[in-house]
Image (cartoon, rainbow, N blue to C red):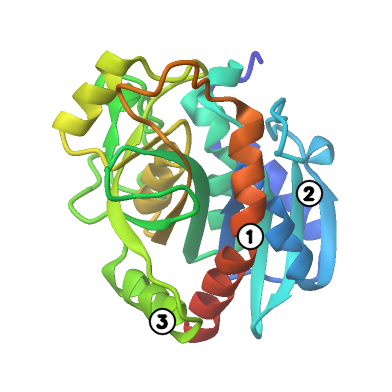
Amino acid sequence: MSETTSTRAQVEAAATAVRAATQHQPAIGLILGSGLSSLADTIESPDVIHAAGIPHWPTSTVAGHSGRLVIGRLEDQTVLALQGRVHFYEGYTMQQITLPVRVMHALGVKTLIVTNAAGGMNPSFTPGDLMLIKNHLNIPGMAGHNPLRGPNDPEVGPRFPDMTAPYDAGLRQLAHAAAAEHGFALREGVYAFVAGPSYETPAELRFLQMVGGDAVGMSTVPSVIVARHAGMRVLGISTITNMAVPDPAPGVVLTHDEVLETGRVVIPRLTQLVRGVIARL
């Protein structure tokens, strides 16, 4: 992992490799989180590209993240879906884990839909809920681990990008309309990004609740920051896979298998939601 930053040359080399492997020109990007990658199986006329064959592309080491790009048609739109992502806790830098978003931008993607598995901290949530992210808490970023740290390329985005509204309100409205069409409701809330890989202590969960977090997870926010830096519209969707409560019942232990299983259960609704949003764009 000697390449700790993402230079324009690296982004272009990766984008060139993707272009050579497909005739599609995607306008919408999808990042599919833990247990959610089967959504890409609904893409029509797909070109499947293994991330290991793309220069400078980081390789995932986590179960549920297959490390493939699927490019094709979904609801009469051309999409690029990442089956899985890499995380800061795997040992990569913030610049490395967000290179895929840079490549999406170089390929012409204008809208990014990002999904994740998250622990619900809002007591009104239940496992299996879908939460639209309306804002986030970037805990590692507040401590200095921001993907925009280092030299800025002004041709990509500004040195100091505005983060007043990182998640597009218009896209959230489309999502609510799509959910209503299929007879289910969506939550909205603040996603708290933590570095992981250890789950949060009770004291940490109390802190995150106190500062306004509704759900907590170990991904998404760096990608959103880079997407907004490049001027992309962003829709964020959290699958509430478990309840992250400060005082769990005795003997309750959270495992990654539980996260994956709840993700599998919610796939039909998530698929309807994402397809409904894309159909309305």
Up-down relation of residue 27 to residue 36 (above or below): below
User: Which x, y percent locates residue 40?
Assistant: 72, 61
| In-image side of 224 versus 161 (left or right) | right
* Mark 3 secondary-structure assignment: helix
Q: Secondary structure at mark 1?
A: helix
Query: Disc 2 versus disc 3: distance between alpha carbons?
Result: 40 Å
Q: Earlier in the sequence, mark 1 or mark 3?
A: 3
Q: Going from the N terminus, do you reach mark 2 or mark 1 first?
A: 2
Q: Is residue 214 left or right of residue 197?
A: left
Q: Earlier in the sequence, mark 2 or mark 3?
A: 2
In the image: residue 161, left or right of residue 109: left
Instruction: Spot the residue most to the left.
Output: 210
Can you identify the residue that label 2 sits on?
17
List x then y, in percent, for residue 62: 69, 28
Residue type highlighted by circle 2: Ala
Q: Is residue 232 visible?
A: no
> Which residue is the site of mark 1?
267
Q: Tell me how far mark 1 sits from mark 3, CA to CA.
A: 17 Å
- Residue tagged 3: 180
| Residue 51 in sight | yes
